Every structure is written in structure tokens, then in C-alpha cells.
Amino acid sequence: MGLSQRKRERLGAFLGELPVAAAVKLFAAIEADREAGGKGLPHDALLDDLRRKLRERGATPVRRPTAKRTFFEPFEDFFISIRSGKKRRAQIARTSLDPIWRVMMTDPALTETAMAAAALDDAYRGDGDVKQLERSLFLSAEAGLSRLAARVKESEAARASLQEALGGEDALADFGEIRHLMEAAEALRTLRVVVPSHSPSLNEEQIYDLRQLFLSVYEQSPSIAGYLLLALKGRLEAPWRALGVYYHLAQSADERLMPARETVMALPESLFEDLEAIARALEKAGGGDLDVQSAKARLGWFIDYADGLARHAQKAGDNVFLNRIEACRDIAGEAHARFVEQALAAMRAALPVRDSRGSSRLAAPRPDYSRTVAPGVLADARTAVALLVEAPAGARRLGADPGLAEKVLEDASKHALTYANDLVAEIRAAEGADRAAARTLLEQTMSVIDPLLDRDQAGLIRDRAAAAAVTV
């Protein structure tokens, strides 16, 4: 069961309002339902949002260990909730995990793995040598996945069957990447000790330990060593902080790093691929109908990502990377300008009007309180207004001229103020049900336009509306 970007953001807002105790209980209940095979909930989306909200509030959800969770744990820094565009290295969709595990538990090549998983689950529920059983799970999985990969390589029919079982070409690629990462499992577990999850930065001791771990793994497999560095994008507080680690390694006097330059370079290249992908997504979104919720979230993420990379590049005096960031900002800046224009239209959509029909204000359109504004239109308008208010600052952070954004914001504020004042006049002139409908529209309107008005303006409008409502 999938969720649109808009629904995910609204769901995230709701989950963020839950008390920590309730959120933890909900997390456990959703996980239990997913493991029991429940189909009625978007389990992954709910769990991702809850996990993030709990971490933001300093509460890590307690998760019951299972063989499946133990198996995937070393690779979780590569998991992504939503895949947009083509499959990329070190990006494994969470939607691929259930099909991969199902194949591992049912394919004849992995019979020993299924038995090891069952024994480990029994041990988690009772007593037993858990550590030994965990080792058995990984050893049997590595051997079984190799057998399955060999079978698929030899037979096109076997490959097609596995692809169908996993749910598509991208999921098959995720499967292949996890099989490749099996030899990295131990190193990735060590990385989790060296770099705790959500670390804001690394101290000198951590940098030293990371360098030693990287060099040790590089001697065995340059490819796996590259994955160690790419995992930092998921382990650090924000992915762009990994660029600082790159500069530590690239500027190190350790001669052992010289042969590994190309492997180390994979980290900043991946970070810039992220930034360029977000910029292209903004460019594409700006060419179509505005999804206000998604546009605001994407813009905010891009601006934070670009600023984060730029800070590290400036500190290192890296003009090449700074130029790449500016090129992405140019693309995003053009999309931002289109979003701002569209946001004004989204705000207007929540402020319905009708022709004045002989009104004393000539042909000026009047607020239409007879029309119902859908909740989704109201929610979009509120987000659009937030985007408009932030637009000048956003343009500056993108390196663009804020003049256009300031002009659109000024137009939006004038329109909002005029509309609210006209609506007060409609309340005064109406009676009975019409007056009640006009008051309802004013309440909805103020919930949308309030950020565009200063406190005195908003207070005066509400006072005048209250007085108009009791006019005989």
C-alpha cells in the first residue's frame, strides 16, 4: 500500500503531535501487524515517519529482535523509503526488503538460511546461543545467495523468475547489491560502533578509527571500502556532513590513502548526485501543476542540502565543488520562481469569489460564501502562504534575485487584506444562514492568510467581523 507525497506529509504532521509514549506503543503495534502479514496499513511509511519523529524527540523505539531484522541491520544505512528515478549504487528501497526476505525463506538454494532464521527467531523468543545462531544465519545466507546468483547467471528463465518474485528490475538490482554487501556485513557493523547513528560530526579519534577501518577493508576489497564511506550518508545527522569526512581523508598525510583516491572520491560524487537529482526533480515539478506540499518540502530539503555542502566546500577552499553547487542552485532557483507564482494561485483558490452584480464597488469580484472550500484546497493554501512568506529568503539562499518573490508576496498580502475586508462587509450585509456562511468563510480565510498580515491588521479584521456579525 503506497502513499502520495502529500498524504505522507500530512500523516507525518499528525504523528509528530502524538505523545512519545503513544508513539512508541503505536510503533510496536504497527511492526507486529506487519510481521503478522497485515495488508490494511502502509506499514513502511508509518514506521519511517514514527521512527524519525521519535528520534527527533530523543526517544528511540524499542524493537523486538527478529532474524529478518538482524539480517538487514548491517545494510540499513543504504535503505531509502521512496525511489525516484533509476536505481543508484548504495540506495536500496525498503519496498524490496520483504520480497527479498520471502525469496530467502522459500528458495531451495537458501534452505539452510531458512532453517537458521527459524532457529534464531526461536532463540529470540526464549533461551539459546543467539550470537552463534546469528553467525550461522549470515554464513548460510552468504552461501545460499551465492548459489542462487550462480543459478540466475546461468539461466535467463531463472533470472526472469527471480525478477518476477522480487517485483521488478530495480528490486532485482537491490537483491544483487545486498548479496554483494554480504562480505561487508562485519565491517558495516564495526562502522556502526565507530560512528553512532545521527552523529552531528566526527572527532579526531573517530576520524582515525574510520580511516583505519577503511584502509583495512580497502586492502581486501576497494568496492566494499567504498560502501563504508557511502554508509556515512545514512549514519550522520545529515548526509551532507559526510563531505567533511571526505575532506579529512582527501587532505590526510597518510600515504596509504594515495592508492584509494578514486574510491574515496565516490563519496562526494554520490553527494553531488543527490543534489543534482533533487534539482532535476524540482525542475520537472516546476514545469507541471504545483503540488504545494511536495514543492515546499523539496525546496527546503534542496536548500539545506546545498547550504550544507557549500559550507564544507568553502571551508576546504574547493571551488570546483562550489561551482557544481551553484549550477544546481541555478536550476532550483528557476523552479522556485515558478513555484512562487503557482503558490499565489493556490492561495487564491481557497478564497472563492463571485461577480459583484451591481455592487457599490463597481465590477470588483466579491467573496463567495456560498461555495464550499474543500479541506485539501485549504491545506494547500496554508502551505502555499508559508511558501510565499519564505520565498524572498529562499531566493536569497538559492543565490537568486529576491525581487520577484518580494513582488509576489506583496501582491498576495494586498489581495488577502482586500478579500478579508470585503468579507467583513459581506457579513454585515447578510442575514441568517448567509451571515453564518460568511463568518465560516472568514474563519477559514484567516487560517490561510494570517501569516501575510501583521498582528494589528489581523486583530482589526477579527474585531470588525465580530461587530458586523451582531449588526441588525
Image (tube, rainbow, N blue to C red):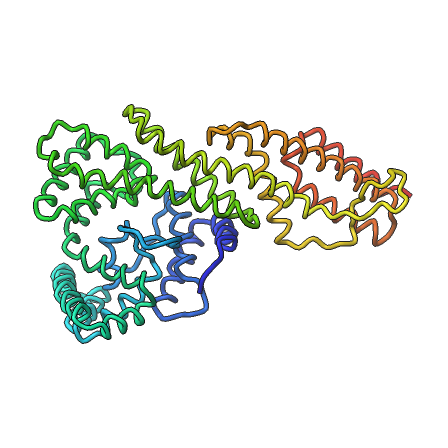
Please tell me how many numbered marks the rendered image carries: 0
Name which quarter of the figure residue 342 lies in: top right
Residue 52: % across, % down: 39, 48
Horizontal side of residue 46 vs 179, given as left or right = right
The residue lying at 11 percent from left, 40 percent from top is 215
Residue 240: % across, % down: 33, 37
Quarter of the figure that contains the N terminus: bottom left
> Compared to 259, does 378 lie above or below?
below
Residue 386: % across, % down: 58, 39
> Compared to 82, does 338 lie above or below?
above
The residue lying at 40 percent from left, 53 percent from top is 84
Horizontal side of residue 75 vs 388, given as left or right = left
The residue lying at 58 percent from left, 34 percent from top is 389
Quarter of the figure that contains the C terminus: top right
The residue lying at 19 percent from left, 60 percent from top is 179
Residue 377: % across, % down: 63, 51
Name which quarter of the figure residue 319 lies in: top left
Horizontal side of residue 112 vs 50, given as left or right = left
